[in-house]
Image (cartoon, rainbow, N blue to C red):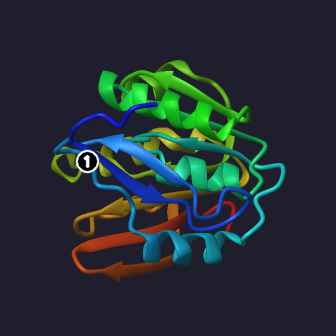
Amino acid sequence: MAQAAGSRKIRIVGGQWRSRLLTFPEYSDLRPTADRIRETLFNWLGQDLSGLHCLDLFAGSGALGFEAASRGAAHVVMVDSNTRVFRALQENREKLQAVQVELVMANAADFIRSDTRQFDIIFLDPPFRLDVIPVLLPQLTEHLGAKGLVYAESRGTWPLDPTWHIKRSAKAGAVHYQLLELKSHA
């Protein structure tokens, strides 16, 4: 497959596809989660995600969703609304033969309103300019399974709804990232 002009790459850091490259288009809103942050996140989650169901709500480069699948997640739903980005996700899924990955081309808010499934882990890493975490986070509660977790990544902090508990948090450069759980699950 020929490499498209203006494409970028990111490496999967762990699991069965460790060191495999994901290719994604050059796009201003695409900011893949850095290797160091992904390593920390998957240390928090545990390296083996066998049997878990994950949702990558702003899939972008696919770094978080494919990383979860690489580490044994049973099913990973990856959502993105950009046509070029979605095409790259399809190509990466095919290249990895990632049969456990379901791709959905949709707006994240529309997907959350229309889908009724529950997930063990929801990755919430929207383009920073959208500033949608405070809006979407309350809508995720009905999509979390028992002991479900939400990973949120943002440019800064935001006021956290009192129904949530910060299980882990860190900062790398300008990126703030947190692992959240419902207080009723804490």
Residue under the image location 73 percent in, 35 percent down: 100
Residue under the image location 69 percent in, 62 percent down: 185
The residue lying furthest to the right in this view is 51
Dot 1 lies on which element? loop
Q: Nearer the viewer, residue 162 or 72?
A: 72
Q: Is residue 94 left or right of residue 25?
A: right
* Amino acid type indicated by mark 1: Pro
> In which image quadrant can residue 175 be found?
bottom left
Q: Nearer the viewer, residue 28 or 2?
A: 2
Residue under the image location 51 percent in, 18 percent down: 114
Q: Is residue 32 visible?
A: yes
x, y percentage for residue 13?
57, 67
Q: Is residue 80 left or right of residue 67?
A: left
Q: Nearer the viewer, residue 11 or 118?
A: 11
Q: Is residue 162 left or right of residue 18?
A: left
Q: For mark 1, what is the residue?
A: 127
